[in-house]
Image (cartoon, coloured by chain):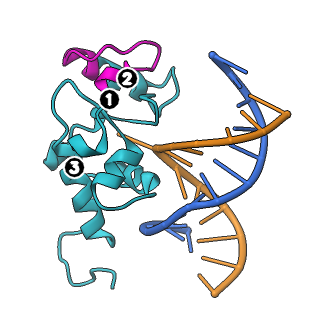
Chain colours: A cyan, B orange, C blue
DNA sequence: GAACTGACTGTAA
DNA sequence: ATTACAGCCAGTT
C-alpha cells in the first residue's frame, strides 16, 4: 500500500523503517558519529546501509536530523572530497568537536551499534 | 515485473 | 593509497 490515504505525505512507503532510522540517527550523541551500516543495524534493519542513505536523503528538515553525524564505513564521509556537501558536513562535525582529517574522522569518534 | 539507481560495504587488483 | 567490482536490499522508473 503506497499510503495513498495519507494526505500530506509524498509517496513514502517504508515509513516504519525510515522512522526507525531517523530515530537512531537523532539519538547519536553530539561529538560522535556512526556509520550507515551501524545505523541500519541499530534500527533493526541489518544490511540496509543503503536504505539509511535513502532515509537520510528523504528526511524532512522539520526533524532537524543530525545527518552530518552519519558517515560511511570506517568513518569516511560519503561525499566526494570536493563536494560542497562534504565540506559542509566536515564543518558541522568540527563545530561539535569532531576532528575531520581529509574526509575522515578518528576511530575514537565512531560509536558502535551497542552504543546506539 | 524487469531494469536501473543509490548519502553502502568489503574484497581484490 | 586508489580504482574496480561484486554483493547487497529497497525504492523508483
Q: Label 2 near label 1: C-beta < 8 Å?
A: yes
* Residue occupying image coordinates x 18% and y 53%: A23
Split into 4 quadrants, where in the image is the N terminus of chain A?
A: bottom left
The stretch in magenta equals A92-109
Residue A116: quarter of image:
top left
Q: Nearer the viewer, mark 3 or mark 1?
A: 1
Q: Specify the subunit that label 3 lies on.
A: A
* Chain ID at mark 2: A
The secondary structure making up most of the magenta span is loop
Question: Could you tell me which chain the residue with mark 1 belongs to?
Answer: A
Q: Which mark is residue A110?
A: 1
- Spatial separation of the CA atoms under disc 3 and disc 2: 20 Å
Where is residue A22 drawn, in percent x and y? 23, 52
Residue underneath mark 3: A24
Residue at the disc numbered 2: A107
| Circle 2 crowding by C-alpha within 10 Å: few under 14, some 14–19, many from 20 | few
Q: Circle 2 sits in a helix, a strand or a loop, which is it?
A: helix
Please state the horizontal and vertical placement of residue A64, each as a whole percent of the image.
15, 42
Apparent side of residue A78 relative to residue A68 in the rendered image (left or right): right
Left or right: where does residue B9 sit relative to residue A33?
Answer: right
Q: Does label 2 lie on the same chain as label 3?
A: yes
- Relative image position of residue A82 (x, y in whole percent): 51, 20
Amino acid at each position: 500500500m503506497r499510503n495513498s490515504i495519507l494526505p500530506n505525505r509524498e509517496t513514502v512507503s517504508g515509513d516504519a523503517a525510515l522512522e526507525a532510522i531517523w530515530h537512531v540517527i537523532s539519538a547519536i550523541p553530539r561529538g560522535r558519529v556512526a556509520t550507515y551500516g551501524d545505523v541500519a543495524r541499530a534500527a533493526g534493519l541489518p544490511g540496509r546501509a543503503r536504505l539509511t542513505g535513502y532515509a537520510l536523503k528523504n528526511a524532512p528538515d522539520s526533524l532537524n536530523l543530525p545527518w552530518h553525524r552519519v558517515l560511511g564505513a570506517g568513518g569516511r564521509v560519503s561525499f566526494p572530497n570536493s563536494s560542497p556537501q562534504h565540506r559542509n558536513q566536515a564543518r558541522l562535525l568540527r563545530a561539535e568537536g569532531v576532528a575531520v582529517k581529509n574526509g575522515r574522522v578518528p576511530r575514537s569518534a565512531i560509536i558502535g551499534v551497542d552504543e546506539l
